Amino acid sequence: MNPITPESRVEVLLIEDSPRDAELTKRTLKKHHLANNLIHLTDGQQALDWLMGEGEYGGRDTNHCPKVMLLDLKLPKVDGLEVLRAMRSDDRTRSIPVVILTSSREELDVIQSYELGVNSYIVKPVDFEKFSAAVAEAGHYWLLVNHPPI
Amino acid sequence: MSSAYSISDPMDPFDSSPPIGSPKSLGSSPDCEPAAGRPTVLIVDDVAMNRKLLRLFLESAQFNVLDAADGVEALEILESHPGPIDVIISDILMPKMDGYQLCNRIRKHPKFNQLPFILYSSTFESPSNDQLCLAVGVSRFLAKPAPPEEIVRALTEVLRKPKPPAANWVPANDTAVLKEYNQALVRKLEEKNHELKETVAHLNQAKLDLHTYNLELEERVRERTEELIALNQKVTLLNATLEERVLDRTSELQAANRELESFAYSVSHDLRAPLRGIDGFARMLLEDYGSVLDAEGKRLIGVVCGEAKRMGKLVDELLSFSRLARQETRRLDCDMTLLARCAFEQIPAQTRGHIQSLKINPLPWVRVDSSMIRLVWTHLLTNAVKFTAHQPAASIEVGALAEDGFHCFFVKDNGAGFDPRYKHKLFCVFQRLHSEAEFEGTGVGLALVHRIITRHGGTMRAEGKPGHGATFFFTLSAAALSNAEPSLPLFSAISNEP
């Protein structure tokens, strides 16, 4: 986890339980200078606690929202779709851009994600080059091109 | 019977005397109106049918006929008949008075003792029988049944030579006759008795058999009835539980389907993640430490990455193969020419660059699941492209034939072909007829195609020879016949000449 100073704004919130996938993602973002303010959490409950300023993140200023959230679907404790559902029903987190980054190309997952208001759905390719390209493209778009509501 | 009254033998010396053999009197009734000059016969027989037959026959042979059912009646007729009676033909065994007694009585009768008397009986002939005949003064004995002409002849003879029996008949004393008669009668009765016993035995046996059959039949009917009742109960029970079973089975299937889905989900997610790790970290190794590795070190890392990717592809194809089993087919009218062309165009240009000639003949419209059939074209065309890679003048032809009223589509190439001995392995998952070094592949593509075609009720086959290209054919069932007409003229053959 990167130490986040109160001043620095969290730009990327990465929710990924696989340390390998997390490392690959972070490496790619870093390579493209997109991971300056990145926080990595490893399960759905942690993600919700961080977002809502609860549990171990009690007292965190919830007005500070990430520019983009990279969310895996298959997560311990609370899965990605549950996290998404909770976020979309809370005013504080409703408008955070969410990119699903998952191995699942199951149609049902895609449909449900979009129904829950996901902004992007990226299937992680096995091929690292393609994976890198996809992550870099998403990071570039959401961090540099897109204009966030906040 | 026709021969009985039509016999007329011109050589017969008796022929002229009694008017035998003249058929004119057939159907006349001498009983009511006795014809003059004809001999009168008295038939004595207790069986009405015998009397009737003999009367019919003798009447047709120009006799006047009288008849009696037994000896007593015969004597009464003799006494009371107004006209003369010329001859008697009598059965032996009869109620009230039998043939012997009748004859005996006649021979002792003052008025009729000269009357010719013929015994006509089915009972045996034997010396002692003859003796009795002689003793009672019988003129002639005839065995029943005698041919008609023989009866006529006997009657004619006894009438013609009406020798008074007295001439060669010495009336035996009554005691002797009685003795003889009793003996004959006893023999006849014994014989009758024996016959009767046999008949009774037969009847009893038949009765027994019948009873047995009856019992068997009843038993079978009972068994069958029980079976039917049991079956009926079973059917009723089955009917009652059918709905329940259908529901059960449906939920079982749904559960199995869910299980399969979650399995596929796990495969999709959990098998691919480590592969990405392998590929990714090998790349990182190359990026970060490439400078300290020699060429062989770098090659080895390349192998690791390649294998990981191949495994990833395998997993993906396996997934799409299993997904197909769960996917419902949604049939729509589709333009096959368009589907085939799009499938070809989606193959990356650098992959299909070597194809010198692509010919897509006009294909019919069909009613199929377009996304599935698109996969069929994609796999078949990708295969054709792949296996013509080493071909200097690679060409592919796509077309359709009419086969038993159905469409049969084909993709033909002039590529590496295959050994027809292993044809049966073509459509099995993970079966390959070429080495990975020759042509890369997972062995899932054709299995997938086969499954799609089977889902559409069609069939697949392939023809090929090593080095002489391959042709893959697939048919679609009647359900795939489309009434849709292409709104535009069909695509003419599309050429991909570079």
Image (tube, grey):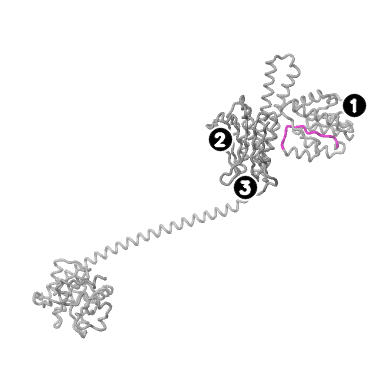
Residue stretch rendered in magenta on the structure: A95-106
Q: B361 or B70: nearer the eye?
A: B361
Q: Residue furthest right?
A: A7
Q: B389 or B271: nearer the eye?
A: B389
Q: Residue at label 1? A: A6
Q: Which chain is indicated by disc 2?
A: B
Q: Quadrant of the N terminus of chain B?
A: bottom left
Q: Quadrant of the C terminus of chain B?
A: top right
Q: Compared with residue A51, is residue B490 higher up or lower down, i.e. above or below?
A: below
Q: Which chain is indicated by disc 1?
A: A
Q: Amino acid at mark 2?
A: Glu
Residue B284 in the image: state x and y as whole percent: 74, 21
Q: Residue at label 3? A: B479
Left or right: B417 in relation to B27: right
Q: Dot 1: what SS?
A: loop
Q: Amino acid at mark 1?
A: Pro
